[in-house]
Amino acid sequence: MDRRQRYREQTRDEAKRIALEQLAEAGPGGISVNAIAKRMGVTGPALYRYFANRDALLTDLIEDAYNDLADTMQAAVVHRAGSATQMRALATAMRAWAIAQPHRYLLLFGTPVPGYEAPIETLAAAHRSMTAVLATVGEDREPANRRSTLYRQLGAWGEKMQTGELTPKQLHWGITVWTRLHGVISLEVTGQFTLTGVDPELVFKAEVESLVAWGERG
Amino acid sequence: MDRRQRYREQTRDEAKRIALEQLAEAGPGGISVNAIAKRMGVTGPALYRYFANRDALLTDLIEDAYNDLADTMQAAVVHRAGSATQMRALATAMRAWAIAQPHRYLLLFGTPVPGYEAPIETLAAAHRSMTAVLATVGEDREPANRRSTLYRQLGAWGEKMQTGELTPKQLHWGITVWTRLHGVISLEVTGQFTLTGVDPELVFKAEVESLVAWGERG
DNA sequence: TACAAGTGTTAGAGCTTCTAACGAAAGCTT
DNA sequence: AAGCTTTCGTTAGAAGCTCTAACACTTGTA
């Protein structure tokens, strides 16, 4: 990494940092290349040497967020023993990440930014997230030999993901964990609980315990 | 309703209709007052006689969507007997509505449009949606007399909503139904299942059956 | 018939993304 | 060291956007 390249990285990072602030303040639509440049002390068109266009900047933000979330989830489950413990750690970490930066969570799971197509780079991050989820899966005490369409698709997915010895039932459980945690978190970060007066954290914790109880049944 | 007012309604409706097309094509950011006006055969500023500004137009779209979804859910559970049947009908209707117009579902539950604050008018719609969900709740065979914080908050919410004789446990179940259905639907409409090759409909149906089974246990 | 209300127009300020052309600085090669 | 190439920043400008102001025309009412 020579000098020029390092400087280039710094400029890109600073632009992204400011973009994240704008994102938090005014949503994805509030991110303006022009305004970022102004705050960096350069003119608007200068930034186009660093990002092909506004969409490219957004794509970078999304990729970073994917990786950051995957890191967080992975770190939460590693060095922990027992699927119940791992489940609680994973769930807590995931929600904490989302609550700390709702706009970033919504960048990943909210309204998709138009023109964005998940690039191959995010595949690795998605894979790491899912691996973290699958670490919380308990053992399959009575492997189902039912061969439904869903189980066949799950089997194919498992092979593609190289998940080792996990049964379709376990993979299905992983997806269920994912959808249920996301269900609560998503409604919380979009503010859908505020009208009810019910504390979303308590709802979330109850959902996690329900998952733990179900998981311990095998 | 005199002539002028009727004409005014028509103009507003046409503008909203075109806005929905733009929404489907390019997301919320793709909605342009100017472009709508041009397609209607008038100049840009003319539309500002009908909507105070772009945000007001978006707010109208959101309100309409809220009401439409509430109508759909309400219609799904009414004239049906048995909580399991009602649950399946509600879930199917909710998902069908979301899949048929993902952009509209995301207008409600995706990234919130900045500057939008849920007006009182949507309260009624939210209430009707929740009532539909609560219709699928089975009886509470052993009412918990546990007095946790969550149950106290649920109780207060129930009184505010005038839900009649529903116990906190039943209200909690209603919220759980809501978050779990939303969890799967939300990930489906944002395209998060596509990489897995697993059919979201099958995942959704499995989740519904899991809810039905849990509900029948009381 | 006269007046008021409603609806449309053009002009324009101020913002945006993004391209084109130009000048200056930094690094590499001979 | 001299010269060439790559990189980076500038200004100018096209084309779009939201939204306001001022003006004209049509419609409904007193």
Image (cartoon, coloured by chain):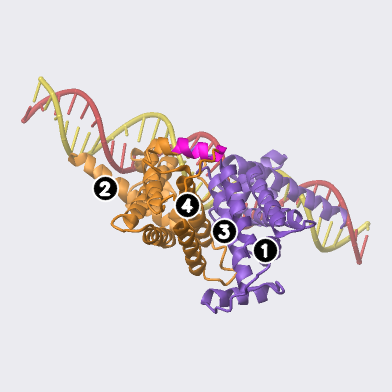
Chain colours: A orange, B purple, C yellow, D red
Q: Would residue A150 be counted in the magenta stretch?
A: yes
Q: State whether discs 4 and 2 lie on one chain.
A: yes
Left or right relative to A41: residue B154: right
x and y, in percent, of residue B113 in the image:
56, 55
Please report the bounds of the magenta region as a residue range.
A148-157
Q: Is residue A51 above or below residue B63?
A: above
The secondary structure type at the circle numbered 2 is helix
Q: State whether discs 3 and 4 lie on one chain.
A: no
Q: Is residue B121 above or below residue A6?
A: below
Question: What amino acid is found at the position of numbered circle 4 in the picture?
Answer: Trp
From the image, tell me which residue sits under label 4: A178
x and y, in percent, of residue B205 in the image:
61, 47
Q: Quadrant of residue B125?
A: bottom right
Instruction: State whether the magenta stretch is mostly helix, strand or loop.
Output: helix
Q: Quadrant of residue B120?
A: bottom right
Q: State whether discs 1 and 3 lie on one chain.
A: yes
From the image, tell me which residue sits under label 2: A10
Mark 2 chain? A
